[in-house]
């Protein structure tokens, strides 16, 4: 499933439900970028599409666009 299909599947609807915009001040463009990043698996921590990256030491979620692993953010 490619990025666009996953975004359209509803699996990333939570990104656009308003809580991230309120919590982090994300714009519509930021939310679209975050959805694109989260639509692919993370090659560093193996987070599945639609889920936040995980801290590989503590196992905690890395919330926020800037906290996602670079390897995931730079995938094309």
Image (tube, rainbow, N blue to C red):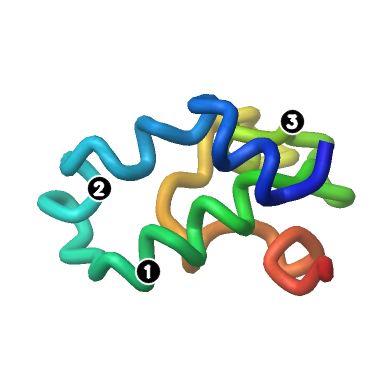
Say if mark 3 contacts mark 2, CB within 8 Å: no
Which residue is drawn at the image coordinates 50% and 66% (left, top)? 33
Query: Which residue lies under the disc numbered 2?
Result: 20
Q: Against 28, is 51 above or below?
A: above
**Of the image marks 3 and 2, the number of the one nearer the N terminus:** 2
Q: Residues within 10 Å of mark 3 (few under 14, many from 20)?
A: some
Label 1: state its secondary structure. helix
Q: Against 43, is 19 above or below?
A: above
Location of the N terminus (image quadrant): top right
Q: Which of 72 and 40 is in front in this view?
A: 40
**Of the image marks 1 and 2, the number of the one nearer the N terminus:** 2
Q: How crowded is mark 2: few (under 14 residues within 10 Å), some or many (20 or more)?
A: some
Location of the C terminus (image quadrant): bottom right
Residue 64: image location, x then y, percent:
41, 54
Q: Which of 52 and 11 is in front in this view?
A: 11
Query: Which residue lies under the disc numbered 1?
Result: 30
> Could you tell whether 14 is left or right of 48 in the image?
left
Q: Tell me the mark number nearer the camera, choosing from 1 and 3.
A: 1
> Could you tell whether 15 is left or right of 27 in the image?
right
Query: Which residue lies under the disc numbered 3?
Result: 48
């Amino acid at each position: 499933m490619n990025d666009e299909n996953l975004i359209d599947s509803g699996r990333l609807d939570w990104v656009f439900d308003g809580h991230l915009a309120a919590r982090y001040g994300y714009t519509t463009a930021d939310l679209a970028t975050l959805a694109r990043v989260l639509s692919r698996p993370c090659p560093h921590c193996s987070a599945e599409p639609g889920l936040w990256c995980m801290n590989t030491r503590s196992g905690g979620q890395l919330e926020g666009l800037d906290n996602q692993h670079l390897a995931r953010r730079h995938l094309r």
